[in-house]
Amino acid sequence: MEKLAIDDVSSPVAKPSFASIANSIRHTTSKHTDRYRKNARASPQNSLIAAGLSSYETLPNYLPSQWSVHIHPEGQLYFFKDATIPVVTEAYVYDPNLMEKVERCIKAIEYFVLQKQIVLPDNVELFIQIEGNDCSYYLIDHHSHMQFWLDDLETNEMGIDMVTSPSHLGLALQELYWIHVEYFPTHLKSLAPRVLEDLIGVLSHALTDHLTSRNSTFPYDAGECTQILQLLRSFRDQRQDEYARCVIARMWQLVFKHRFETFYGEQHARLCRDQAILVDTARESCLFRIFTSLLSFKTSDNYVSHLNDIYVDHLVYAHQWQAFMAQSLREWRSFLYLSLLTPLCCLLFFFMPTLQLLSAFSALCFGTSFISSVLLIHRHEVLENATANDALNYLNGVRSDRFKFQWVALVYAFPKTFFLWGVIGYNSNCFVAAAVLIAGNVGWLPYFLALVGICLLAIIAFQDITSGNKVLRIPTFRWSRVDQELPPVSLV
């Protein structure tokens, strides 16, 4: 099939066929434009400052009729054409060549609409992006708050995640609509008051959910929701400008992104953050988990539990990840200092009649604990304040289809695991040293028995800490006072 370039659309010689028109226009979404991927470079230079008060507006300042220039709050220049089908574009139409390409692209899409006999909504708006001699587009409807196209498309073609129903797809299209409004807010009229009030209601519910539950699905914590609510409520008492519209649109696109990920309004909606609702064929290895649990004194189990709680259905919440990473870094730093100081005690055994092998074993374990702490801290310091996307990309990279998070949890447990094995080797040396002294002098027997008793109590206490099966049952005493019994109260 012959591909039609924009330059061919308005040719007076040949009328383009419907098939060639369809092949010349590409589809895009508001998420996949070149807005943040432009390669153009500025070349500042010295300039003359004219005497007196002068105008320093952008030159050139001429545009054809129906066209107007606008500036996004971030500083991005864009252009709007008030026509039968309103058009927005970031192409620099002050350049006559780009203006010609944009106009030809508009004509190509209008011709496409006529050929296919499509009836467009009244509140439609067309986005145009120039790509060499071709163009890409999407349309949005300000009434239904949806983004749409003129062809039947598959979701994977447009970079949209898989959906479970038409209403679920609608949430994704509404997210794309609000991204468009966020990128092009300056030329728009004021948003309906209901748009702001509904958004305040959504954030108020999210704040209440965080304050009364530990498993809220909303991606912002209580403190962040409070700050956003204060900002949104301030818009009630002032004229709605492009800054307010940009903020409101950004928050709405985040709300619809959250709703899409939690299957809002669907049969299997996610009601808790740690609720898995997607089919997961990956299974953890039971034998490997038992082995790592015994090897690490259940430390790896703790990390597996935390990672599985953070990563549910390929979703990661930033505040949950940051809290976990901060706690892990504190633990690794503590064993870094402990494993650095404790090996000094092992040096004493090299000058005593003990087993040199045990001394070497404990020193090796303390050294491994130190090195693993250094490497883990070095690797994960940059992830302590990672965004949700950065944390998700990291966890996707370290997660195994066969073992899930068991391997990475074992690595996270290395500092504590090797430190504890080093302590065991060190205490074994103590027993050997005591046995040697007793063999030479029977008077050391009471001290040896006392040492054995203390070590046994330490082992039992350690078992109580690392296991749910309690061995020690220490009685507790509490003074209590018998008060006069109050009559029962019934709540009506």
Image (tube, rainbow, N blue to C red):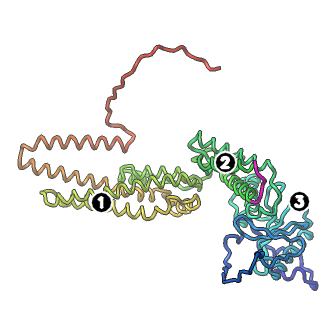
Q: Earlier in the sequence, mark 3 or mark 1?
A: 3
* Viewer-side label of 3, 1: 1
Residue occupying the point 81% across, 55% down? 190
Q: Which numbered disc, 3 or 2, marks the residue closer to the eye? A: 2
**Callout 2 secondary element:** helix
Left or right: residue 467 compared with residue 89: left
Residue 230 has which mark? Answer: 2
Find residue 121 and name its label: 3
Label 3 amino acid?
Pro
Q: Quadrant of the C terminus?
A: top right
168 left or right of 103 in image? left
Q: Which mark is residue 123?
A: none
Q: Identify which residue, 278 or 425, lies in the foreground.
A: 425
C-alpha gap between disc 3 and disc 2: 36 Å
Which one is earlier in the sequence, the residue at label 3 or at label 2?
A: 3
Q: Name the kind of residue labelled 2 in the image.
A: Gln
The span picked out in magenta is: 237-242
Residue 2 can be seen, yes or no? no
- Label 1 – label 2 distance at C-alpha: 48 Å
Identity of the residue drawn at 36% across and 25% down? 478
- Disc 3 vs disc 2: Cβ atoms closer than 8 Å? no
Q: Toward the viewer: 439 or 490?
A: 490
Residue at the farthest bottom position? 13
Look at the magenta stretch and give its main secondary structure: loop
Between circles 1 and 2, the one closer to the viewer is 2
**Is 94 drawn above or below residue 191 in the view shown?**
below
Classify mark 3: helix, strand or loop. loop
Q: Amino acid at mark 1?
A: Leu
Q: Mark yes or no: residue 421 visible.
A: yes
Determine which of the numbered discs, if any, sits on residue 340 in the image. 1
Dot 1 or dot 2, earlier in sequence: 2
Few, some or many residues within 10 Å of mark 2 (<14, 14–19, 20+): few
